Image: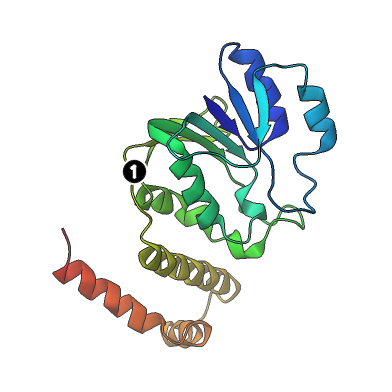
Amino acid sequence: MFWILEVVSARLHACTFDNRSISGLQSRHPRSLYPPQHGIAVSKGIPTIRFISSAEDNTYDALICTDVLEHVQDPLVLLADMIGKLRVEGHLVIYNCFYPLIACHLPSTFHFRYSFDLFCSLLGLCKTGKTKGDHATIYRKTGSIAPNWPLLREHETMSAIAYEANQWNELHPRATRIERSFYLMKLHPKYYAVRAKRVLRSLFFAP
């Protein structure tokens, strides 16, 4: 069984996998325009496609998500939810564009372009490769892991800080190490405290 977060992908895969059941997730937001009504209409002639408002955990063999997370305020919550819907050994095929290509790509997500694989690993996914043409990444669910939200949020904070620091460094290539340190402290006053805590935890609580 497949779960697909995009109408065009649902139609394409329905033509490829004739005997597979494909679910398209409808937004729960009352004002959402997605999936678009014309997309639902043109999919009615394909009996293996159905649109659902919610999905059960540990249900799907594969999930396809293209160009979604860069539009979401909290990508980690949606990512964890998607992973929860997969069966163990199921596959997540996902393409993200954490770049400022269009106005509706949220800048708060751009740091994930460098750290997305880390969060997938922390949530129980193993990266297995790319799709043909190197468009999307394929992950396999290796086990059911309850999200450790304090740890995930800590990594998210550090990822965002690292991204902002790199952006600043590119704009100030001649900045001294002291200037960079002051910028980090201004950007996130607790940066060095959080960094020290992570180092101590790795030294004394490493598996």
Residue lying farthest right?
38
Relative to 19, 46 lies left or right: right
Q: Is residue 164 above or below residue 31?
A: below
Relative to 15, 145 lies left or right: left
Q: Quadrant of the C terminus?
A: bottom left
Please tell me which residue is depicted at 44% across the width and 32% down the height of the picture. Answer: 91
Among the 4 quarters of the image, the one containing residue 96 = top right
Q: How many marks?
A: 1
Q: Position of residue 125 (x, y in %)?
A: 38, 42
Q: Secondary structure at mark 1?
A: loop
Residue that mark 1 sits on = 144
Q: Is residue 31 above or below residue 10?
A: below
Residue lying farthest top?
18
Relative to 13, 60 lies left or right: left
Among the 4 quarters of the image, the one containing residue 21 = top right
| The one of 15 and 177 positioned closer to us in this rendering | 15
| The one of 103 and 175 positioned closer to us in this rendering | 103
Q: Position of residue 145 (x, y in %)?
A: 33, 48
| The one of 195 and 119 positioned closer to us in this rendering | 119
Q: Position of residue 172 (x, y in %)?
A: 57, 77
User: Mark 1 is on which residue type?
Assistant: Ser
Relative to 24, 147 lies left or right: left
Please tell me which residue is depicted at 38% across the width and 68% down the height of the picture. Answer: 150
